[in-house]
Amino acid sequence: MKSLSKLSVLLFTVILISSCGKQETGQLIGSQNRPTWGGFNPFGMVYVPSGTLTIGQSDQDVFYTYAQRQKNISISGFFMDDTEITNNEYRQFVEWVRDSTAHEIMGNKSEDDAGNERIDWETELDYSDETLNDMYYQGDMAFEGKKELDYAGLKYKYQWIDWQKAAHDKEATRTSIINKAEVTIFPDTLCWIRDFTYSYNEPQTRNYFWHPAFDDYPVVGVSWKQATAFCHWRTKLWNQFKQDEPNTEVFRLPSEVEWEYAARGGHDISPYPWGGPYIRNAKGCLLANFKPGRGNYPEDGGLHTVKADAYFPNDYGLYNMAGNVAEWTSSAFHENAYDHEHDLNSDYRYDAKDEDPEAYKRKVIRGGSWKDISYYCQTGTRAWEFQDTTKSYIGFRCVITYLGRSINDF
């Protein structure tokens, strides 16, 4: 009888627990079929917490433009790559596009549950198959009979949503806010020759992106459009791997304000990422890869670029936020953009079309490079380049917005 009583209590408890959370209780308990979310920490990225930044030059305005007036900006937390994107990391993108192109030619496709055609990545590729001959240089294009892939033919197609148009144009349709792009993704290795007149840089053109000696060096010769395409591909790669988790934010280029906030490393109004007012430490050693003096390039330890994790990181753990290569941002360049930007997550952006005037195609680059004087290495110094140009001294790194108040909440 006692055992039966215990059994009854146990069954009642099980029934009570199993009924908890169901809508039949008549209580406001929220939707119960929700996925769990414990945050994530992307590989190779560091967390930059929310905070406030005083944007603008922290040293003398040497050009006396008075256009970059200081302004306080509040910024949401985000993850940022601890180094610039390296040759080997970008090569993963190139090889993905190469393989996807080959799969398309071979017809290696399958349908998903929604009836959409997807590449069948399980099928092994045989690049000796004659069906793929069009991917290689043929006839007079072949050099000394070598079988070489025509990387100029590798293009990445992607779509994105124009959220600004969706929010402000009441007549906008779903079709009108979906934009499409197709980008040739191979780095422009000839920029090493084109950027410098009467200068022997052919070894860099032949080897910089290919040779394993440069695997951990920052990728260069990548336009703003190519960097943006890389970010989209990286998001796609992540979402395919984490299918069961709710979609995270997208990988993207940092805004100009996010870049400056991260570069300062928590030291507001500091000229350099390490917080000090000088480009040398107490021992007289240079702290970044730039152009010292009147052209003593190797004095800082690097004649051209150096490894992406060279020198000491700033207090956020970010390497080479000054020097090495300048970095693309998502921001459009305008001399007095600070006067127009909002003080919450400033984002002065414009998606320039091919037919737009050249002035509309200027994008902000930050950080200075191995060929620049120290002024351009300062955290508050702005520069720009056209979005469709490629340079031997411009690279990039990605960010992704953090979802939640703080990483310490998990």
Image (tube, rainbow, N blue to C red):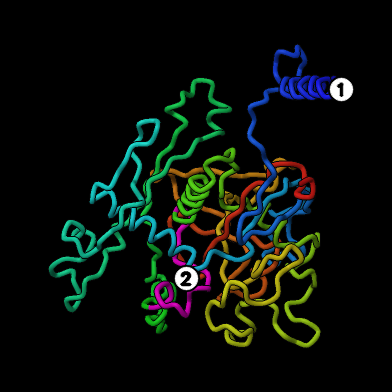
In the image, residue 294 lies at what x, y percent?
60, 84
Image point 55% across, 61% down: which residue? 396
- Pointer 2 residue: 392
Q: Which residues are magenta?
A: 207-225
CA gap, disc 1 and disc 2: 84 Å
* Mark 1 surroundings: few (<14), some (14-19) or many (≥20) residues within 10 A: few
In the image, farthest residue toward the right: 2
Q: Is residue 379 above or below residue 55?
A: below
Image point 55% across, 76% down: which residue? 371
Q: Is residue 59 visible?
A: no
> Residue 2 — which label?
1
Q: In the structure shown, which secondary structural element does the residue marked by tag 1 occupy?
A: helix
Question: How many labels, in total?
Answer: 2
Q: In the structure shown, which secondary structural element does the residue marked by tag 2 occupy?
A: loop
Nearer-the-camera pick, 42 or 300: 42
Nearer-the-camera pick, 146 or 176: 146
- Quarter of the view holding residue 315: bottom right
